[in-house]
Image (spheres, grey):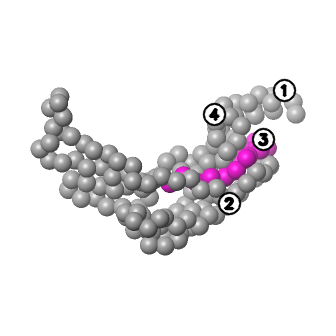
Amino acid sequence: MGFFDGLKSMTNAITGGAAKVDLEVLDPTVRGPFTVVVRALVGDADLEINRVYVKVCSEEEVEPRGVYDAEGNELEIEVQTFAAEYEVAGAATLPAGSEHEWAVEIELPEGCQPSYKGPNAEHEWEFFAGLDAFGNDPDSGWIDVEVW
């Protein structure tokens, strides 16, 4: 490995730019299992990862009409209703320029609420995929998903 290869690897570790990561959630539901697919396109240097993971969370936001805080602002209540992390794959070395795809089946616990939007309340789900690597993990960022 030359000096510039080492510099490139260090930059990727700091920025999380060692791979482009995205995810796809197939038929998400609160009524049974569904599949989450994680895809990664590795940059121009080999990438050692400890694992591939998916995070899932949901949040309910309520805006009761006519209710104000001490400063006179209309009240808004946000409550996280679910949060979990799922391991998709274990440690591996991903070669430079390679493409990878992993899938994990997820079943949400009984009692989870589906997505909804009402006049004063909404319940939203977000999914996040990441590659656990040295430095800043390459990731998909949080993605809004309608869960039924």
For residue 100, the mark is none
Q: Which mark is residue 15?
A: 4
Earlier along the polypeptide chain: callout 1 or callout 3? Answer: 1
Q: Quadrant of the N terminus?
A: top right
Q: Give the residue type that dot 3 points to.
A: Ala
The secondary structure making up most of the magenta span is: strand
The answer to whether 137 is drawn above or below residue 59 in the figure is: above
Residue type at mark 2 is Glu
Q: Magenta residues, as a range?
A: 41-56
Secondary structure beneath label 1: helix
| Identity of the residue furthest to the left in this view | 66
Residue depth check, mark 3 versus mark 4: number of the one nearer the observer:
4
> Where is mark 3, residue-wise?
45
Question: Residues under labels 3 and 4: Cα distance?
Answer: 14 Å
Report, in whole angstroms, how far the alpha carbon at label 4 lies from the one at label 1.
Answer: 18 Å
- Residue beneath label 2, please? 101
In this rendering, which labeled residue sits more in front, label 2 or label 1?
A: 2
- Residue at position x 25%, y 54% from top? 121
Give coordinates of residue 9: x percent, y percent: 75, 34
Tell whether 133 sits left or right of 111: right
The residue shown at (17%, 30%) is 70
Q: Quadrant of residue 99?
A: bottom right
Q: Nearer the viewer, residue 51 or 138?
A: 51
Kindly identify which residue carries mark 1: 3
Q: Locate residue 86: give its quadrant.
A: bottom right
Amino acid on which the number 4 mark rests in the picture: Thr
| Mark 2 surroundings within 10 Å by alpha-carbon count, few (fewer than 14), some (14 through 19), many (20 or more) | few
Q: Earlier in the sequence, mark 2 or mark 1?
A: 1
